[in-house]
Amino acid sequence: MTIHSIRRLAEAGALLAALGATPGAALAHHSFAMYDTASVIEIEGELAEIRWRNPHVRFTLNVTDETGAVVPWELESSSPGMLERMDVPQDVLRVGDPVRAAGNPATDGAPEMFATNLLLSSGREVLLRFRDRPRWAQDQTVGNQGAWFVTEGDPSAPELGLYRIWSSTFAVDSPPLLFPDNTDPTFSPLDYPLTDEARAAVTAFDPVAASEAAAAGCEPKGMPWIMEAPEPVELVDEGDRILFRISEFNTERVIHMAPDADVAGAAPSLLGVSTGRWENGSLVVRTTAINEDQLNFRVPQSDQVELVERLTPSADGARLDYEIEITDPATFTEPVRLAKHWIYIEGARLATYECVSEE
């Protein structure tokens, strides 16, 4: 049996994203199809509203146009968790502040922008996305981008083993996501070993319509889609079960570890039913009964899907390697294997994810 490996594609995508050559689509919950990422514009105005909430921090900027009319521009940014990791405090911006904003304009010409940089009247510049560099104030910036490019985890607590909070890294040599079609412009979802039916669904997919719906709403993700989330995760030992907590949507997976765990006949759910075992220092998890109908943003998924995950912490506790094998005869002609890893950063935390729909 041939395993379709796409680790190399994910690594290539991470490299391009780090260099600024391609947008990190997952960083904005897949709303990048709404913006012209090849263009950067600047606008100036007064902050009329600040919405510091999941899934995206948003601002309303009142801009006076050439006719003297005030036009409210809607600005979208990264998630609160990402900005927190970049050390961007909420109180750096206040309603009424005059601001210059730079970012990617809406593809349809609407007064909307994905904002990457904000210049304050004090001369300080706020960096809103991890891969963007200062545009105006080289020495007065708010936003520690280096936090995203940490390549090595902290080896100071090997005794914790698997059970701790793990953080994503967006370093050049580290794929941050499971699905490379989010980060690699050379990879198409059609490169998966798709069945004819799945290929037709991927071909017919409308990314703009899906992006608008995803950006506005608060629909939680199921397995395995939720595992690409760039926010921190935590594993908690509860004896006969392990909790796998994910910041995004306050997700909590339950992994049943008892050999006699009775999971037969469990009702299908977004996260499915998971059973685990230990194998040579790795936690191996089998998940079935999943009713999530999307593998990721573009690829469909059927109720026949079965997942086998392998989580392997390093001996010093600095890194957690993750592999997942996806078998879905309705979607793939052969199993697909994906991989990523997390690192241990002391002091990382799982922030409460309070999503508010824009609809």
Image (cartoon, rainbow, N blue to C red):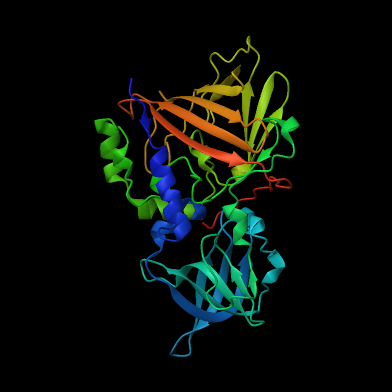
Looking at this view, is 158 or 279 the one in front?
Answer: 158
**Residue 248 spot, x, y in % from top left:** 59, 44
Residue at the extreme top of the image, as rendered: 260
Does residue 318 sit above or below 261 in this rendering? Answer: below
Does residue 169 sit above or below 329 in this rendering? Answer: below
**Residue 256 spot, x, y in % from top left:** 63, 20
**Residue 68 spot, x, y in % from top left:** 48, 90
Does residue 52 sit above or below 300 in this rendering? Answer: below
Is any part of residue 270 visible from this angle? Answer: no
Which residue shows up at 30% across the image and 34% down it? 198
Residue at the extreme bottom of the image, as rendered: 67
Q: Quadrant of the N terminus?
A: top left
Which residue shows up at 51% across the image and 69% down it? 74
Looking at this view, is 343 or 266 the one in front?
Answer: 343
The total number of labels drawn is: 0
Which residue shows up at 30% across the image and 39% down it? 191
State the image quarter where residue 333 is shown. Answer: top left
State the image quarter where residue 160 is shown. Answer: top right
**Residue 203 spot, x, y in % from top left:** 27, 44
Is any part of residue 19 visible from this angle? Answer: yes
Looking at this view, is 117 or 268 the one in front?
Answer: 117
* 200 left or right, relative to 179: left
Which residue shows up at 37% across the image and 39% down it? 299
